[in-house]
Amino acid sequence: MKKKKIYEFIGFMSLRVCLYLVIAVLFIFLYDIGSKGGGTLSWEFVSQAPRRGMTEGGIFPAIMGTFLVTLVTAFLAVPMGMFAAIYLNEYAKQTRITRFIRLSLRNLSGVPSIVYGLFGVILFVNILHFGTSILSSGLTLGLMTLPWTITASEEALKTIPNSYREGALALGATKWQAIRTNVLPYALPGMLTGTVLGLARAAGETAPIMFTGAAFYLPILPSSLGDQFMALPYHLYVMATQHHAISQVRPIAYGTALVLLILILLMNLSVVLVRYRLRRVKRE
């Protein structure tokens, strides 16, 4: 018994040390970005276009470009991903084909984003002739996000006990009525969490949009989904590695990184609020 307690103590201490290390690295990372980019943040920085080769001005076109391409991504990935998860978990028979589909989805989740970027160039830019545009980039990111959305939504649906479905069916409800009234309200918070995490990842990707629509320097807002655009992750990449005066624009690069982190944090915070709201409504 004493030996087991020693092993248990060592195990818990190892877990705590790993947790503290992760938190420490996170705080160091956030402190570095915040201390070097906080001085750049101002209303001018987030509301004006870049000037003089991106050495002055702000990043408003990049913010709007990131918002628009994420919106296109959401329109593709969210409904398709959720409906695909509902079909796989609630309607599809558990056969070799469905197991193969799930295995393929998990493999697609691990495919490097640059591969999706090359696929987007071939399919959306060249074959479908959408050109290098917001639409091509959004659809490419949507395809990249789909496996995450489907997997997260299906896992959320699996947490709902079968008794919820069986109770509704026993009262004469159809299968869809049982899913809509007794399953989705309880699975929706988990489905939304996985979906928004996938969208947050897509909003921070550089390789797919670099090939399919992001512009190096475009200080005007796009007028349609067929236009090129600036985006925060690609703007940060250019400022940190490709600019002709890297040392001069380094504060702007840190400010861009800080804005991108804040936007992703707001996306995640919105999910927390929505989950809290949905759970509160169910309790009432």
Image (cartoon, rainbow, N blue to C red):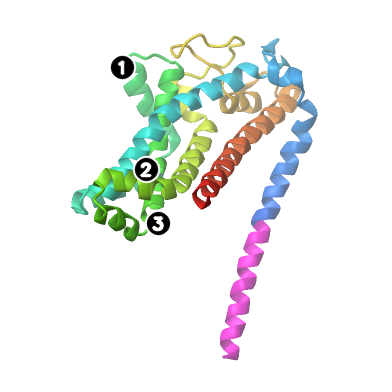
25 and 148: which is toward the camera: 148
**Residue 7 appears in the rendering:** yes
Q: Is residue 76 rendered to the left or right of residue 65?
A: left
Q: Amino acid at mark 2?
A: Ile
Based on the displayed image, in which of its 4 quarters is residue 24 positioned?
bottom right
Q: Earlier in the sequence, mark 1 or mark 2?
A: 1
Looking at the image, which residue is at 75% across and 31% down? 37
Q: Main secondary structure of the magenta part?
A: helix
- How far apart are the two marked residues, 3 and 2, measured between alpha carbons? 15 Å
**Residue 104 appears in the rendering:** no
Q: Is residue 39 rendered to the left or right of residue 13?
A: right
Q: Earlier in the sequence, mark 3 or mark 2?
A: 2
Query: Which quadrant would the N terminus be assigned to in this image?
Result: bottom right
Residue 28 rendering spot, x and y as whole percentages: 72, 47
102 and 215: which is toward the camera: 102
Q: Is residue 60 rendered to the left or right of residue 82?
A: right
Residue 64 rendering spot, x and y as whole percentages: 58, 19
Classify mark 3: helix, strand or loop.
loop
Residue tagged 1:
128
Based on the displayed image, in which of its 4 quarters is residue 164 positioned?
bottom left
- 231 falls in the magenta region: no
Residue span colored magenta:
1-21
Classify mark 2: helix, strand or loop.
helix
- How far apart are the two marked residues, 1 and 2, measured between alpha carbons? 25 Å
Q: Amino acid at mark 3?
A: Thr
- How far apart are the two marked residues, 3 and 1, measured between alpha carbons? 40 Å
Residue tagged 3:
159
Residue 251 rendering spot, x and y as whole percentages: 75, 27
Looking at the image, which residue is at 39% across and 46% down? 184
157 and 15: which is toward the camera: 157
Q: Residues within 10 Å of mark 3 (few under 14, many from 20)?
A: few
Residue tagged 2:
150
